[in-house]
Amino acid sequence: MAVSARVQSNVGFKVAGVLVALDADSGDHVSAGSVLARLDAREVAAQLGQANASVLQARASLVKAHADVTAAEANRANAAAVARRRSELAKIGHASVEEHRRPGRPS
């Protein structure tokens, strides 16, 4: 499809693209809001699809990060409970002080 203007007009689009339809010419009467020309939107649609996929991936990463935080908090709480239990057992002589003060354990 070849498009040639009968009269040169300066027309601008907000985005760059390939012109696929020209529905008005110089001197035509048009209503406000009428579509005068259309650009090929396939590239923009592909970019939108990629952006939507990125949003979904970011949301999935956020959900995983929240799950990781929850798991880490549970592990910390469990380690603190074990440390308290060992401390109490050491105080009453049912566990050795060495067991209570193993490396990596709070004393």
Image: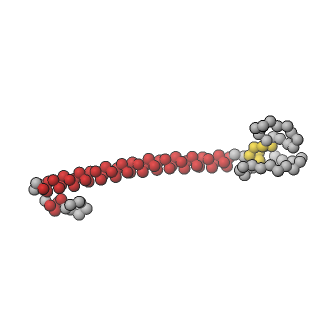
Q: What's the residue at 52%, 46% (across, down)?
A: 56
List x then y, in percent, for residue 26: 87, 43
List x then y, in percent, for residue 28: 86, 39
Q: Is residue 12 left or right of residue 27?
A: left
Q: What's the residue at 87%, 50% (across, down)?
A: 8
List x then y, in percent, for residue 13: 75, 49
Q: What's the residue at 36%, 48% (across, down)?
A: 70
List x then y, in percent, for residue 88: 15, 53
Determine the residue located farthest toward the front in the rendered image.
32
Determine the residue located farthest toward the top in the rendered image.
31
Give the colour scheme of this rendering: secondary structure
Q: Is residue 67 left or right of residue 9?
A: left
Q: What's the residue at 61%, 47% (across, down)?
A: 48
Q: Nearer the viewer, residue 1 or 7?
A: 7
Determine the residue located farthest toward the left in the rendered image.
93
Q: Is residue 105 left or right of residue 22?
A: left
